[in-house]
Image: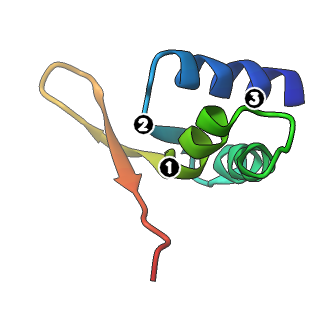
Amino acid sequence: MDGFYQLFFRKAFENNIKIIGVTDYFNIENYEKAYEYLNKLRYDKNLSESESEFYKALLLIPNIELRIPLVTKKGKLINIHCLFDFVL
C-alpha cells in the first residue's frame, strides 16, 4: 500500500492540493493508513524543504460515508458524509 500512498501524496504535491478527504464506509481505517504515511513524509530527510513544508501543511480529513435505508422519490439510496476534525 505504500506505493499507492507515495503516488497519492506525490500527485497532491505536484497539483498543490492542500486539503484531502479520505472516504471510507462506516470507519476511518484508510484515513489512519494515509495519516500514518503522511506523517512519515513530513519528517523524511530525503525530501526537499518545499516538499517537507507542503506535507506538514497538508490537511487530511477523515470522511465516513453512511448509507441509510431510506429511498428518495427517484429510488436512490441516501448517502451521508460525515467529516471529522480531531484537533482539540
Q: Badge 1 local density, few (<14 within 10 Å), some, or many (20+)?
A: few
Query: Which residue is depicted at the point 24% across and 21% down?
Result: 75
Q: Is residue 3 above or below residue 48?
A: above
Q: Please, which residue is most extreme toward the front here?
A: 49
Is 29 placed left or right of 74 in the picture?
Answer: right
CA separation in Å, label 2 and label 1: 7 Å
Question: What element does badge 3 sit on?
Answer: helix
The residue under label 1 is 57
- The earlier-in-sequence mark between 2 and 1 is 2
Disc with the residue nearer the chain's start (1 vs 3)? 3
How far apart, in angstroms, are the residues tagged by discs 1 and 3? 17 Å
Q: Which amino acid, mark 3?
A: Tyr
Q: Amino acid at mark 1?
A: Ala
Q: List the residue tagged with mark 3.
A: 5
On-image quarter of the N terminus = top right
The residue shown at (66%, 21%) is 10
Q: Is residue 68 above or below residue 6?
A: below
Left or right: 46, with 78 as reference point: right
Q: In terms of secondary structure, where does tag 1 sit?
A: helix
